[in-house]
Amino acid sequence: MQNQLLAGKKGIIFGALDESSIAWKVALQCHEAGAEFILTNAPIALRMGVINQLAEKTNSEVVPCDVTSNDDMNALIDAAIEKFGKVDFILHSVGMSLNIRKNKPYTGLNYDFMHKTFDISAISLHRLLQTCYEKDAINEWGSVVALTYIAAQRTFPDYSEMAESKSLLESITRSFGYHYGVKNKVRVNSISQSPTMTTAGSGVGGFDAFIDYAEKMSPLGNATADDCAAYCVSLFSDLTRMVTMQNLFHDGGFSNVGVSAAVMEKFGNASE
Ligand SMILES: NC(=O)c1ccc[n+]([C@@H]2O[C@H](COP(=O)([O-])OP(=O)(O)OC[C@H]3O[C@@H](n4cnc5c(N)ncnc54)[C@H](O)[C@@H]3O)[C@@H](O)[C@H]2O)c1
């Protein structure tokens, strides 16, 4: 129970595809914490229909938005303004790589796909923030959170062009965080989450083995989607008012470990 930490707050949650989605858990926990919000996803994802179950559970409206479309983004933010006046929090939980989906290796990328990947996974955060900025859609001390992955800082061979997408996403977080902070005291942060078994996650090659590896490397183990949702609630709350322009690692310690005893054990004793 989130103790009504978000009572009275209004928001928009992007990216709940099914029950395994990180955004799905965020929506459930925001609802428990007393928030009201609009759920949104690409029209094609909405056609699956599962999101309606979440909308019912959380008493929220569903508004379609393909994040690569200016028209869709304008319509979504207008709908939020009409419903709520201004919003207090937004979760950007959107990512997709066309080259990964089409099994293109990193050394043989299709650049049309790559542009589309950047548009969906990173530029969409700028489009969202710029649309909100122009329409003055976010209350002072509002909080925008985007989800990212440590492949922005370190190389993971199968993460392909998503690594560059996440670097761009984190850079937009800092740059727009500056401008929106100055203008309206709006906060913009990214959460760098542990590998998590979701539709987007499992599209990355060797994901099962990779989750096990990260679990063994992290002193606290991998952070789950529920853990991530709790962290999002804290970042949407007034308890974190002065946190902005940050990339916040939420990974059980993975990002600061060189090697762990558990991983060493897997390789045996080199001196034997
Ligand atoms: N799963 C992981 O291991 C992991 C780790 C770190 C960060 N993340 C990030 O978390 C976020 C959420 O991913 P998830 O793991 O919950 O997977 P997910 O597949 O449930 O969510 C990805 C969402 O992006 C949406 N999307 C794709 N194209 C879109 C478009 N054009 N317009 C609007 N929405 C679109 C999908 O419909 C889906 O809801 C992503 O940014 C992902 O990169 C995931």
Image (cartoon, rainbow, N blue to C red):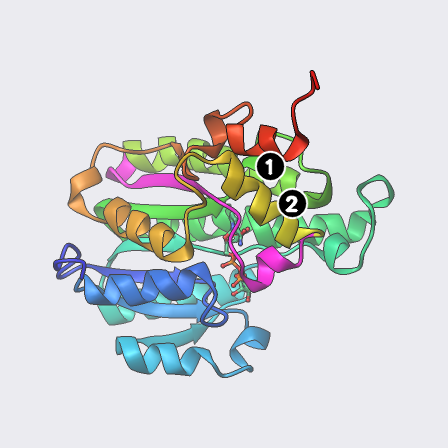
Q: x, y percentage for residue 232?
A: 32, 50
Query: In the figure, residue 80 lies in which quadrant?
Result: bottom left
The residues colored magenta run 183-204
Q: Amino acid at mark 2?
A: Met
Check mark 2 vs ligand 1: CB closer than 8 Å? yes or no: yes
Which residue is more in the foreground, 55 or 74? 55
Q: Is disc 2 placed on a helix, strand or loop?
A: helix
Residue bearing mark 1 = 151
Which residue is more in the foreground, 217 or 38? 217
- Give the quadrant of the N terminus: bottom left
Query: In the figure, residue 8 lies in which quadrant?
Result: bottom left
Residue bearing mark 2 = 162
Query: In the figure, residue 12 lies in which quadrant?
Result: bottom left
Q: x, y percentage for residue 11?
A: 29, 60
Whether residues under marks 1 and 2 lie with C-beta atoms below 8 angstroms apart, the answer is: yes
**Along the horizontal axis of the image, is 219 left or right of 167?**
left
- Give the quadrant of the C terminus: top right
- Identity of the residue drawn at 40% across and 66% down: 24
Check mark 1 vs ligand 1: CB closer than 8 Å? yes or no: no
